């Protein structure tokens, strides 16, 4: 770790939402419908330039879910997507073009995290070997079973991807080994198994304090505080249900050890209200 860890500018963006029942995303929750926004982070590193944490929803979701079997995706998670919320449409207010985004970190390959990838034809994609290996050959129902829609991946994804092996860097409390993306401590990747094969989180040293972008390790911050997993029915669509519960416990331990870190699950209504606002 260098003597001085640089901070990154961080802008958390809303890309749209789907509807879900609280008692599905949080065991024992209310039987009411909630908005699960898909948020992404636009980050600026002082030496490495602009990068994205996921790309969230994009209007092409309507096209790729128009036909069977992927039409089942929009039935299971009713979509509320507006073209102006696509990341590419939001770049202009930061004075950016798609070519300015050098790096995109892909937390995992579920459709609501990768729908905007094709909008960035020059970016390098960073993800894990395990995550890509799990989806690269999947088509049809085998892909849908992983909430993956192959048409969302750029045709040259493999050529532009930096695929990471298992992490071996210094451990975070409760969460284990990390990968230092730029070697300066500013952006640490951490494995968050369970929800999707090879899923990762990002601990970013931002100019407003440290933030752990926790992807879909849980869908609600209360899961971490109260050690409450989602409803067992959701385990039909995850990679490893036991690891889902283990990762939530690990996040609980991390939160106790690092109360200075804001934890941001990608779809949490609390995190959305705090980081983006209504």
Image: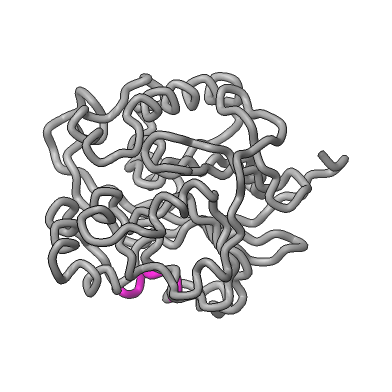
Q: Position of residue 274 (x, y in %)?
A: 43, 44
Q: Position of residue 48 (x, y in %)?
A: 72, 63
Foreground pick, 189 / 272: 189
Q: Position of residue 170 (x, y in %)?
A: 71, 31
Q: Position of residue 73 (x, y in %)?
A: 19, 57
Q: Is residue 76 above or below residue 250?
A: below
**Magenta segment, which residues?**
83-88
Q: Is residue 69 above or below residue 128?
A: below
Dominant secondary structure of the residues highlighted in magenta in the image: helix
User: Does the segment drawn in magenta span residue 136?
Assistant: no
Structure colour scheme = one colour
Q: Residue at x 13, y 37 (%)?
A: 32
Q: Residue at x 12, y 33 (%)?
A: 31
Foreground pick, 45 / 207: 45
Left or right: 265 with respect to 120? Answer: left
Q: Spot the residue most to the front.
A: 137
Give the quadrant of the N terminus.
top right
Asked where in the image residue 109 lies, by quadrant, the reply is bottom left
Left or right: 237 with respect to 165? Answer: left
Q: How many marks?
A: 0
Q: Residue at x 21, y 44 (%)?
A: 34
User: Does the segment drawn in magenta span residue 84?
Assistant: yes
């Amino acid at each position: 770790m260098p003597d001085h860890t640089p901070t990154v500018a961080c802008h958390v963006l809303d890309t749209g939402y789907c509807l879900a029942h609280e008692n599905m995303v949080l065991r024992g929750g209310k039987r009411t419908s909630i908005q699960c926004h898909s948020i992404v982070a636009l980050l600026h590193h002082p030496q490495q330039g602009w990068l994205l944490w996921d790309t969230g929803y994009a209007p092409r979701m309507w096209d790729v879910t128009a036909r069977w079997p992927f039409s089942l995706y929009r039935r299971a998670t009713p979509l509320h997507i507006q073209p102006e919320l696509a990341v590419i449409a939001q770049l202009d207010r930061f004075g950016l073009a798609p070519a300015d985004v050098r790096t995109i970190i892909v937390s995992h390959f579920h459709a609501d995290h990768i729908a905007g990838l094709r909008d960035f034809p020059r970016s390098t994609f960073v993800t894990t070997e395990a995550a890509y290996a799990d989806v690269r050959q999947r088509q049809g129902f085998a892909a849908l079973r992983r909430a993956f829609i192959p048409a969302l991946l750029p045709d040259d994804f493999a050529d532009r991807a930096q695929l990471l092996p298992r992490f071996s860097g210094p451990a975070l409390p409760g969460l284990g080994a990390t990968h230092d993306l730029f070697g300066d401590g500013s952006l640490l990747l951490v494995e968050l198994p369970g929800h999707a094969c090879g899923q990762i989180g990002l601990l970013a040293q931002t100019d407003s304090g440290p933030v752990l972008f926790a992807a879909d390790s849980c869908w609600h911050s209360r899961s971490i505080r109260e050690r409450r997993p989602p409803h067992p029915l959701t385990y039909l669509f995850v990679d490893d249900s036991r690891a889902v519960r283990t990762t939530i416990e690990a996040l609980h331990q991390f939160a106790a050890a690092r109360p200075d870190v804001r934890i941001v699950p990608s779809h949490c209504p609390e995190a959305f209200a705090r980081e983006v606002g209504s």
